[in-house]
Amino acid sequence: MLLKDLLRGLKVKEIQGNDKLFIKDIAYNSQKSSDDSLFICIEGLKTDGHLYIKDAIRRGAIAVIVQKDVKVEGATIVQVEDTRKALALIANRYHHQPSTKLNLIGVTGTNGKTSTTYMIKKILEINEKKIGLIGTISNWLGNEKEEDDRTTPEALDLQRLLHRMVKKKIKSCVMEVSSHSLELQRVEECNFTIGVFTNLTPDHLDFHETIENYRNAKKKLFYKTSFYNIINIDDNDGKIILDEIKHLDTPILTYGVNSEADISAKNIVMTIKSVSFDLMTPSYEEKIKINIPGMFTVYNALAAITTAYCMRIDREQIKLGLQSIKGIAGRIEPIEEFKEFAVIVDYAHTPDALENILKSVKGFVNNKLITVFGCGGDRDRSKRPVMGEISSKFSDVTIITSDNPRSEKPTEIIDMIVEGIRGNKEKYHIVVDRREAIRKALKSAVKGDIILIVGKGHETYQIINENVIEFDDKKVAIEVAREEGIL
């Protein structure tokens, strides 16, 4: 595609060189620049693409898009006001506007995004078979699974992925839409059919600074939809968002348990292995059962059901889709090898998520609830003492350990968690090494106990300084149990 065609509709401040070049590829990472490619300089949180222009040209880039004044020879230089916006627009155009050819469903919120997207995927698969999914755990193109390290990929990677789905004749894609992706314009050129809001609790405040900024970032999704917006009306921020978007042309459906909602759950019954409820919709009532325990499962299911309902999917297909779910990796996932006591792994890494799962599990435990958790480094520090207080309140024993400390000292993170713990100091222990913390929990457990290992869930690594080491809570628990003769 010609460079001048890619630039169409973009606010260009200056062009130095030929804009009639034929562009064969696009990159925002200089190491991925190739012959006759366009390199777009993005200012990231840790580095700046403008520093790598010469490297991109050396690798074959013939045109560069910048937002700063630069003097470089050997390529056409295009200066724009915002290179992130340029990346989104150009990536979308280069890949032939793939989101306009898909039924694209976006799910945003602090907690529940992953579970909700998987539930929607399962329901849609009953009817469409091949479904696309973009999210925290992995991306799916029908039956093809791909790993990614971002909840929502960068604009170029996202448009490329959507284009591949279109080529594979996938008709619907459900994706997690993070607040970062909305604020950093990764989804700027996406045309969403449906937008879903799950909930909002303090998180990522290291990036957004205030809860208002965080909510406003999430709210951007609902200005990008064409068919329906779906809001959890039980959530206070959901009510605020609802009030602020009700003037839009896009219709709104609400869901909830405690508020008057379009779609709701009544007569909720929970066991250690499942949850069931009476589904109430404007058109019908239905009994629903899902093999994942917890009140949060009810809310995630309602979000998925409301999505399917507005798509006019038959109630039997909704039931079949939800019944087919055996579990979601790292989401209240039991380790089946343990029989005398239960060991559960979960991704909960925010105060609200931790409280929700502790409350759910507390209702099933026959003896002690032992919680193993830590907090990530280089992330929102304010939640650390709050999570310490929550764990000490609902757990019989808390073992505080490392999560992904990154560049921070694990002991300093732990000290901040301990600040929130009040009362009996015998209720918590500090074991910095996560493997040894899991060992302590397993060795102290007796029949009827539940050990809850939270914070990492599906992750198979641990980040310590610049090192990424292999660490899977499930595998480590089994290995340690065998070393100790427990299994």
Image (tube, helix red, strand yellow):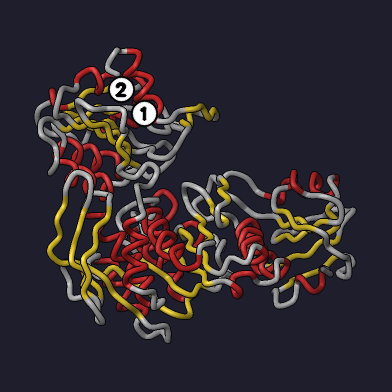
Residue 36, image quadrant: bottom right
N-terminal of the pair, mark 2 or mark 1, is 1
Alpha carbons under labels 2 and 1: distance apart = 9 Å
Q: Locate the C terminus and report the quarter of the image it occupies.
A: top left
Nearer-the-camera pick, 244 or 43: 244
Which labelled disc corresponds to residue 234?
A: none
Residue 447 position within the rendered picture, expressed as x and y whole percent measured from the top left: 15, 25
Q: Label 1 crowding class (10 Å Cα cut-off): few <14, some 14-19, many 20+?
A: many
Question: Which amino acid, by three-letter code, is at mark 1?
Answer: Ser
**Disc 2, disc 1: CB below 8 Å?**
yes
- Helix, strand or loop at disc 2? helix
Q: Give the left or right position of residue 101, taking residue 395 as reference.
A: right
Q: Label 2 crowding class (10 Å Cα cut-off): few <14, some 14-19, many 20+?
A: many
Residue at 40% across / 63% down in the picture? 123
- Helix, strand or loop at disc 1? loop
Residue at 21% across / 54% down in the picture? 275
Residue 417, image quadrant: top left
Residue 414 position within the rendered picture, expressed as x and y whole percent measured from the top left: 31, 29
Residue at 61% across / 74% down in the picture? 101
Q: Give the left or right position of residue 464, taking residue 31 as reference.
A: left
Residue at image mark 1: 402
Q: Locate the N terminus and report the quarter of the image it occupies.
A: bottom right
Q: Is residue 217 visible?
A: no
Residue 232 position within the rendered picture, expressed as x and y whole percent measured from the top left: 28, 68
Q: Is residue 367 visible?
A: yes
> From the viewer's perspective, is residue 163 above or below residue 350?
below
Residue at image mark 2: 437
Q: Give the left or right position of residue 339, taking residue 208 as reference.
A: left
Question: Which amino acid, by three-letter code, is at mark 2?
Answer: Ala
Q: Nearer the viewer, mark 2 or mark 1?
A: 2
